[in-house]
Image: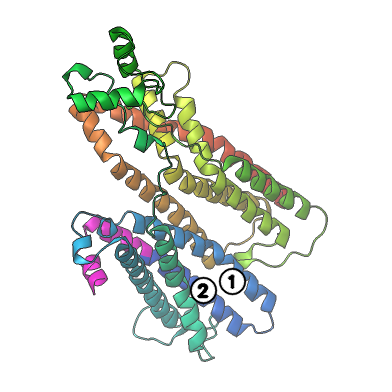
Amino acid sequence: MLALRLVRGAHPAVQFRRLLVAAASGGTGFLLLCTLGYAMGHPDASTAAVLRLAWCLAPIAATVQFAVAVARTDPATRPRAGLAAIGLGPAQLMALAAVSTAVSCTLGSMVALLFFLHLRGDLTGLPFDGDAAGFLAANQPLPLPATLTLLALVPALASAASAIVLRPRVPPPPLKGARGTARQAPTHPRTPHDLAPEGARGTARSTTADPQIPDNLPPEGARGTTRQAPTHPHSPHDLHPHPLPTPTGLPWGAAVLAAGLAVEAYAGRGPHEAPALPGGLTGAPFGVLAGWALTAVGLALAGPALTHLCGRLLQSVRPSAPRLLAGRVLMEEATRIGRPLGVLCAVASGTYAMAVLRTTTRPGIGPLTTLGLLLVTGCALATLLTAAVEARDARAGTTAALLRIGAPASTLRAAAALRAGALIAVLTPLTWAVAELAAMPLVR
């Protein structure tokens, strides 16, 4: 009940994102039900039915990714002060996020079921009654277990993925002599030791000076110098920021991408048995489809590292203040926005390859294939926009601090434009090259 109240009383922008999740879930559920109807109407074409079900994996993955991104940005599931006192700790908030995601996806699945029954002719009184009765096997009874299983697939996967991503993580214990422990031992280098109490002065001497030399033997100047320069090898400099971690997915992403292109090139050579794909696309063997999947995974793995590289390029060669700010933000948000960027590049390359194939062979793309393409593209773009909103909210404190110290708003806008320009300049040629290589085996 608490999850339902949070869903009902959320901000309109949050409600809009949840409605988008419900719409994506409804479209994916309708594709799954249409696959079931095709299998019922064509019991002898088991290979084509399995292939149509395999084509639904891409919309399922895109919908689950979008649902997880919306769950991450949901303000109702963020830890806040005082929630633990009423029994809403991290584990309970994770459960609320999973339930809210399941509610949105279940709503979309129910709408998909009603529309499916309407097109079959089981529900009357609305336009388009029974227009797809022949395709959806309206003359046969709909199996209830299979229907419920297909409709529950997207809500179950989305809620489980949201729970896994938002699970409470226990920070690792600090190592002996680590930075957090060593920061408490030495005094601030700019604090005069003569103003500190006698006990504190003795503690400062014992932590900085040589333990084999008595504290009263060194001269006064050496003692002052020793106090100001701690010799502990792990003592931090508080004025220097911690280095940002570099994403390590670029080698793996490049390897998977190269493997996918190699599989496509090998599968496209010579005559192969090519099954009829949904929507009228023909002439593509199974190896080409597997290669497309591998290239998509490779781009998704390499996305964070490519975003981090864009940040480094912006900061190279005597950067100005907007370039430095834009580069640091890209490096900081490489993991958050890099993965959706890689997925969007994969979707764009696949769409371009299909467009080239359609222009060359001129097959007819049916409405279900069009719906699948719209679902995958829309979910990928919406996931990227949601990740950008999450990144903006995460650095809201930094932006407010820059405005308080007098940074002009034009500098922040210039940094945002530089970030977008760098990403477009680096990722657009890469996406075009991958798309051309992916479409090459299909047009020969």
On whether residue 336 falls in the magenta region, the answer is no
Q: Is residue 273 above or below residue 219?
A: below
Mark 2 lies on a secondary structure that is helix
Q: Quadrant of the N terminus?
A: bottom left
Q: How is the image coloured?
A: rainbow
Q: Dominant secondary structure of the magenta stretch? A: helix
Mark 1 lies on a secondary structure that is helix
Q: Is residue 170 above or below residue 29?
A: above
Amino acid at circle 2:
Leu
Q: Residue furthest right?
A: 270
Amino acid at circle 1:
Leu
Tell me which label, 1 or 2, sits earlier in the chain: 2
Query: Can residue 40 be seen in this snapshot?
Result: yes
Q: Which residue is mark 2?
A: 32
Q: CA distance from mark 1 to mark 2?
A: 7 Å
Whether the residues at callouts 1 and 2 have beta carbons within 8 Å, the answer is yes
| Residue at horizontal 55 percent and vertical 85 percent from the top | 137
Q: Which residue is mark 1?
A: 53
Q: Position of residue 126 (x, y in %)?
A: 35, 81
Q: Position of residue 41 (x, y in %)?
A: 60, 84
Q: Which residues are magenta?
A: 1-21
**270 or 102, which lies in front?**
102
Q: Is residue 266 above or below residue 36?
A: above
Q: Residue 295, labelled with which disc?
A: none
Query: Can residue 424 be seen in this snapshot?
Result: no
Q: Position of residue 441 (x, y in %)?
A: 73, 50
Which image quadrant for residue 25?
A: bottom left
| Residue at horizontal 33 percent and vertical 25 percent from the top | 206
